[in-house]
Amino acid sequence: MDYRIIRRKIESKATSKISESVSLHNIFSTKFLVFLQTIVYEAISSQIFLLLAAMTIGSQHKDRLFTEHRLPSDFVFDEQVASVFEDMINRSVPGYSTIIFMIGLLAERYYQDESNIYDLGCSLGGASCSILEHLKESSCKIIAIDNSQAMIERLEHKKAQFGERGNQIEGRHENVQDTEISNASVVILNFTLQFIPPADRKALIEKIYAGMNPGGILIISEKIIFTDEHLNKLLIDSYHQFKEGMGYSKLEISQKRTALENVLIPETLDEQKKRMRSSGFGTFEVWFQCFNFASMVGIK
Ligand code: GEK
């Protein structure tokens, strides 16, 4: 909801009501005008109340998890995070909505009839929903996996927006490392691999490759680091500037960074490339990058 529009409406209503009452001055007595003005002001203040109520409801979904000073603890994808996740990821990952849209486009191009689509570490199912929208005519099956119960519960509600078609997304509360991959033409790891222990990442990519059909696509998006120290600092600083621009304070940025330190382990693009090649992907390339965030495609 755009509060500026509501505020403008209230202000213009107030102005028009007051000018109306001024022109009525000639016709009605002062007593009657005072009565009229009271009604007008009451109407305006009740609208202000509605505006405040709307702002309160809206704020329940805004990510304010790191606004107050807190003791350092590792970041977890719990109920609190799930309830603000949409706002959090949109304000924390530059290009997130572009990546989500493009995942839909790529899925449309690479999906093979009667095959499976996997959204590994799906969170609220942003990528799954984009795919479902792009594959309107198909009866594709999207297997959306996350090891956060809170995320999967919310995904179930989100699916409802598609009516019957929402059932083409099968949400599963599971560790992606235990997921069996088979007959896959599209596999998505959208900012998930970075949360898998580095020593286990190769086994996961190999398992995905083995479960993919020839001609299938794997889309991996990750936070990345750079071996050149100067460049690394420049891109991290630029990213923090982006976050400030998105309304996060310096305290929020630094507390979130500390919470993610042991949980999100970024790698260089070279490390990603090497692992993809040694797991069998002949074709692999970065298709999107903004600061220290990149999205890559591997084709089997
Ligand atoms: C999106 N892809 O909106 N098994 C299953 N899920 C996991 C695991 C695991 N081992 N580890 C982490 N996750 C989404 C965004 S968020 C990225 C992905 C972020 C899940 C975790 O619970 C969380 O929901 C997701 O991976 C990472 O397109 O928050 O930066």
Image (cartoon, rainbow, N blue to C red):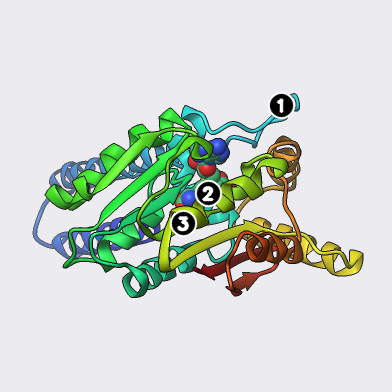
> Could you tell whether 36 is left or right of 111 in the image?
left
> Could you tell whether 169 is left or right of 4 in the image?
left
* Residue bearing the label numbered 1: 73
Front-lying residue, 292 or 284 = 284
Amino acid type of the residue tagged 1 in the rendering: Ser
* Residue bearing the label numbered 3: 188
* Residue bearing the label numbered 2: 207
Q: Residue at x 58, y 67 (%)?
A: 281
Q: Position of residue 86 (x, y in %)?
A: 45, 48
Disc 3 is placed on an element classified as strand
Disc 2 is placed on an element classified as helix
Disc 1 is placed on an element classified as loop
Front-lying residue, 259 or 247 = 259
Choose mark 2 or mark 1, whichever is in front: 2
Instruction: Give the class, few, some or many, for how many residues have Cα within 10 Å of label 2's Cα (few <14, many ≥20).
Output: some
- Alpha carbon separation for disc pair 3 and 2: 13 Å
Instruction: Give the class, few, some or many, for how many residues have Cα within 10 Å of label 1's Cα (few <14, many ≥20).
Output: few
Amino acid type of the residue tagged 3 in the rendering: Ile
